Image (cartoon, rainbow, N blue to C red):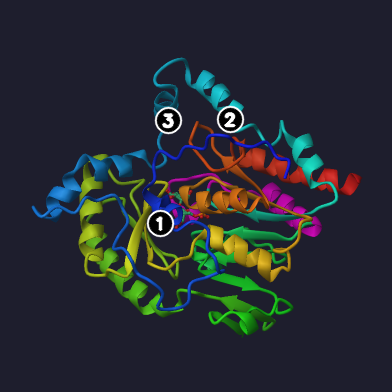
Amino acid sequence: MDLKPNLNPVLTDATPLTRSRLGGVPSGLYSPKGATFPHGPLLAIPRKKTGILDDVRSSCWLDAMKSSSPTHNKVSKDVSHGIGSPDTAYSTWLLKFPSALASFDQIANCAKGKRIALFLDYDGTLSPIVDNPDCAFMSDNMRAAVKKVAEYFPTAIISGRSRDKVCELVGVSELYYAGSHGMDIIVPPRQSISDNHPDGIRSSDKQAVEVNLFQPAAEFLPMIEEVLGLLKESMKDIEGAIVESNKFCASVHYRNVNEESWQIVGQRVYDVLKQYPRLRLTHGRKVLEVRPVIDWDKGKAVTFLLESLGLNNCDDVLAIYVGDDRTDEDAFKVLRELNKGCGILVSSAPKDSNAIYSLRDPSEVMEFLTSLVLWKSSI
Ligand SMILES: O=P(O)(O)OC[C@H]1O[C@H](O[C@H]2O[C@H](CO)[C@@H](O)[C@H](O)[C@H]2O)[C@H](O)[C@@H](O)[C@@H]1O
């Protein structure tokens, strides 16, 4: 594929990426139920014999919490090693991760004669990051752009949120949806996943239309619900902490918690999780995410969807994945390794990534989607 190679992708913060890096790209599409559960929580908490409090007090733990969704200035300074202004750092970074808008002709050239499959993250990609997770609404213009692009290309939303929630927030029925970081996927029945995959089941949606569901973490549901209750209980006296159910995952948000209390948030989450070795912890943007230890992530969800759409074994497919979060790195990495397309990182600050291109913010994402439509309708 003739997309600009990113020659030196360096991932400095490996916390949520470690498993996929060590595990590499899957040989199969999914791990069967009861597959290996090699690790406990994966958050970088060194396990010391001196006790958990020591672990949580270590700068490693707190630094990881602080570095998630850092401010523009902090990241710019880190990446530029303090040299130059944030703008200079961003311009330098753009040399490595060129703007997908500025490089649109190159992407379009590459897509000539190919079928594009589009994968979109939700928070921070289609909607701006806001303090209250329940108020992360996408604009009507963005909704119209997503609806339009889906008329031209198969388009999927892959989110850490529950599938129902992200469906409601996006509100466009012509899309494929994968919630819980890809652990809850819905595809139309013409793609017979239930025949091929043990975790696939036939079901019907709210309009009683037959659909196929793929839920590789289904057996974890009671456990996640139990943990959700414990997390809610343990956070109830921490001002600003929000515990969100994402069906097969649970999120503990600390964006609105006073920074002095972040350590307590981390400690309490860790205390709950230490009783559940089959659950692990990853970091998002000012959020700790509890999820099952299964060999499944957004990258595997992309591979699965490509297969479900009959697009996996074709040379004439260009997959484009747009996302802003660390969990999206798994998808960027899969596309890079399979040479199937490209990742586009949404970031207004320099960040290391497995993506090939970048976009600054959701408004640029909208412009990119509109450009895809204009290009496709002009050929
Ligand atoms: O995979 P995504 O669709 O990007 O979902 C990842 C998480 O997004 C949400 O949290 C983030 O956005 C919130 C709203 O802007 C913000 O308040 C929060 O700090 C961010 O972490 C969502 O609430 C989580 O459940 C998702 O896992």
Image mark for residue 19: 1
- Please indicate whether residue 249 sits to the left or right of residue 208 in the image: left
Where disc 3 sits, the SS reads: helix
Label 2 beta carbon less than 8 Å to ligand 1: no
Residue 67, image quadrant: top left
Label 1, residues with CA under 10 Å away: few <14, some 14-19, many ≥20: some
**Magenta-tinted stretch:** 124-152
In the image, the residue with mark 3 has its CB under 8 Å from the nearest atom of ligand 1:
no
Distance CA(mark 2)–CA(mark 1):
25 Å
Residue positioned 54% across, 44% down in the render = 128
Q: Residue 187: where, in percent of width, then height? A: 66, 72
Q: Nearer the viewer, residue 240 or 18?
A: 18
Q: In this view, does 366 lie above or below 360?
A: below
Q: Name the residue under label 3.
A: 75
Q: Does the residue labelled 1 lie within 8 Å of ligand 1?
A: no
Amino acid marked by disc 2? Lys
Q: Name the residue under label 2.
A: 96
Q: Earlier in the sequence, mark 3 or mark 1?
A: 1
Q: Magenta stretch containing residue 134, yes or no?
A: yes
Where is residue 145? Give x, y as percent. 73, 50
